[in-house]
Image: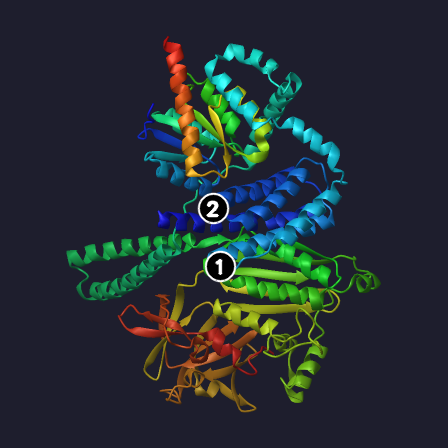
Amino acid sequence: MNDEMEEIISEFITESEESLDKVEPMFVELEKKGQDADMLNEIFRSMHTIKGAAGFLNFQTIVDVSHSAENIMKKLREGEVTLSANLMDVLLKAIDMLRLLLTHLKSKDGIEEDVSPLVKEMDSALKSASGVSDSPDMTDQKQKHAKPVEIEELIKSYSETDQDTVSAENNTTDTGQETQSMELNEAKENQQKNEAHGQKLKDISSKNLRVDIERIDNVMNLAGEVVLVRNRLLNISSYLEQKYGSDDQVESLMESVSFLDRVTSDMQLAVMKIRMQPIKKVLSKFPRLVRDISSSVNKDVELEIIGQDTEVDKTVIENIGDPLTHILRNSIDHGIESPEERIKKKKSKKGKITINVCQRGNQIVIEISDDGKGIDLAKVKSKARDIGLITTDEAATMTSEAATDIIFMPGFTMKDVSSELSGRGVGMDVVKTNISQLNGYVQVITEKDVGTTFRLCIPLTLAIIQALMVEVSGIKYAIPLSPIEETMKVSKDDIESVSGQNVIVIRDKVYPLFNLNRLLRTSSDGLDNPDHMYLIVISLGDKRFCVAVDKLNGQEEVVIKNLKGVDTTSSHVLGATITGDGKVVFILDVTGMSMNLVGASSS
Amino acid sequence: MTINYTQKVLVVDDFSTMRRIVKNLLRQIGFTDIEEAADGAQAFSKLKTGGFGFVISDWNMPNLDGIGLLKMVRDDDELKEIPILMVTVESEKDKVITAIQAGINNYIVKPFTGEILKEKIDIIFDNTSTLMKELNK
């Protein structure tokens, strides 16, 4: 029984949190629209449902808060009061409190919150919104509610007589005939309303299934293993085909392996999709965030979200919230000007931030654009020089793309005194780190007085990737294919040196060149054959550089296996994989490597 | 009259936690065969498959709400006798009267305990057996 209760409570917490997630952005929408029967109803039902279950589970504080919220929602729904800023604030406070109470439940920390001040605040906000005056309402209520004793008698009387005499009975009861027919009509109306809205509020529980995350991860892991084995079989069978191609059995084997190959690819896609969810899960909290932040700095900002149905992997959903929040804060704090400034610049008083999510090839691209004042690169450079992040020389020769990268350097800040929000110098570098951990990268496009766009590019799948197999000094490595622009064979005569840095000119563009051994700081220094080498041209955002290796061993689909106890940031290793010929090979983190390179920007 | 605890019960509510809570309470009372539905429409189709002893239903649900389900059941020749227990909230007492006219057997206010639920179920079956006695006279 106890386990059952545990599960019920856990389900209650999950469902309530989801319910709150769903209705919170509706509040901000309602503030804009003013009225929307469906939304008001949704929010009401959400509070009503949470209160109902909490009552059974004896969570009195949750009952109290949701009860007061439900009261307010009821009045709003019935049009008896209008949604003032005061009511909105108090309702949002209620949602925050409910979230807090649910968090306490989840962590079982036993902390109790005193909700009575909030409840009082909510009740008085409702009173003042309804123009007060208790008396007329109360007497109406008394008449509407029949006393419990009467109802019991009614039930007894109905069960003992047949339907025909029921209507006669109606007339003789205390509640009176008019109220009876009114209620019947009301019931009919509600029924019609429910049926009409029923289509919109269709219950999707029958289409969904709750599954333990661990089970899904287990399936993903097994799928990964199947991919590895498939790679092995492809490898072995191609060898056998060369050697024993005419043998019937070998032919059958080839057919089977070919089929396995196709099915495995399909399975991979299908398994990847299991973990994908619409990104709106993360984006839904932003309308409110933008509202709260902009009012705290006295700016007027509108948020538009496009493409919230775009699906992304669960890991992205779990890790993209923080970077997006930092960027939004940055845009509101530093990007969007105050209403007065905007008017002076002949811009609309209301600033606009757009979040645009779309899938491009095998990447998810998230763009956050504001129509603010843009990033003043000259100021950024001089500030960075003052703080000591770059030297005067670097500031002078730096390209504008490299300059925008400065804002991501740890410790960089534009403010002299940290404001409440940003300006402490920890926001933007966290963004860059978070995104690289998702194997993605950030680009910044900015124009003075026009605005700034942050573009986040993240690969679709994280577990299985296409990789280029390379070899340097006899050791094999795998390099993810996505940042690779091209590969080429060069001789040592093609390499030049500029200010001590090896470079190569490709189609009139100069690319810095790095020896993979040096990048990985392995013990071997040079390349096996200094006369010839293979170059891998890497393109990451605006960074372009070349990595030199001894051999290229073709492309392979690899499953990234995480390595426990390895510091991926300092070692530049994403993980390891088992190749088609059964060997363990490190997968390199090119994005990580690129962050430590100086002078890797395109010129 | 002793209640038949082996009869099949249908629990209707659009919030799955609620269904679980009610199911748990029913099990504590002694019922073992309990099925669920998330709205009135689902409930009606389930009932049509036959064999249900009684129904406990919430009132506010999408697609087809409590009173809608009630009316469909009472209109249906096969199902019209099925006892229905309506789950309501404190402030909806005025709706109870509408429900009584439409034919619920009893109502129960949430939150309720297993004991209260048992009492209400007892009353339903007591009333039904009284009704049967009356009809057979």
Q: Position of residue A231 (x, y in %)?
A: 29, 64
* Vertical relation: A436 (above or below) A45: below
Q: Residue at x 39, y 11 (%)?
A: B135
Foreground of the two, B17 or A501: B17
Which sits earlier in the primary sequence, circle 2 or circle 1? 2
| Residue A157 appearing in the image | yes
- Alpha carbon distance from label 2 to label 1: 15 Å
Q: Secondary structure at mark 1?
A: loop
Q: Position of residue A95 (x, y in %)?
A: 60, 51
Foreground of the two, A213 or A515: A213
Q: Position of A103 compared to A427: left or right?
A: left
Instruction: Quickly name the residue at label 2.
Output: A57
Indicate the chain on which mark 2 is placed: A
* Vertical relation: A165 (above or below) A293: above
Q: Position of residue B106 (x, y in %)?
A: 47, 26
Q: Position of B48 compared to A592: left or right?
A: left
Foreground of the two, A101 or A520: A101
| Residue B79 appearing in the image | no
The quadrant of the image that shows the C terminus of chain B is top left
Instruction: Quickly name the residue at label 1.
Output: A110
* Vertical relation: A378 (above or below) B13: below
Label 1 neighbour load within 10 Å: few <14, some 14-19, many 20+: few
Q: Position of residue A505 (x, y in %)?
A: 53, 81
Q: Secondary structure at mark 2?
A: loop
Q: Position of A350 compared to A354: left or right?
A: right
Residue furthest bottom as drawn: A500
Q: Quadrant of residue A563?
A: bottom left
Residue type at mark 1?
A: Gly
Q: Residue at x 55, y 25 (%)?
A: A149
Task: Check residue B87 in the rendering and tell me which mark sits there, or answer none.
Answer: none
Foreground of the two, A171 or A578: A171
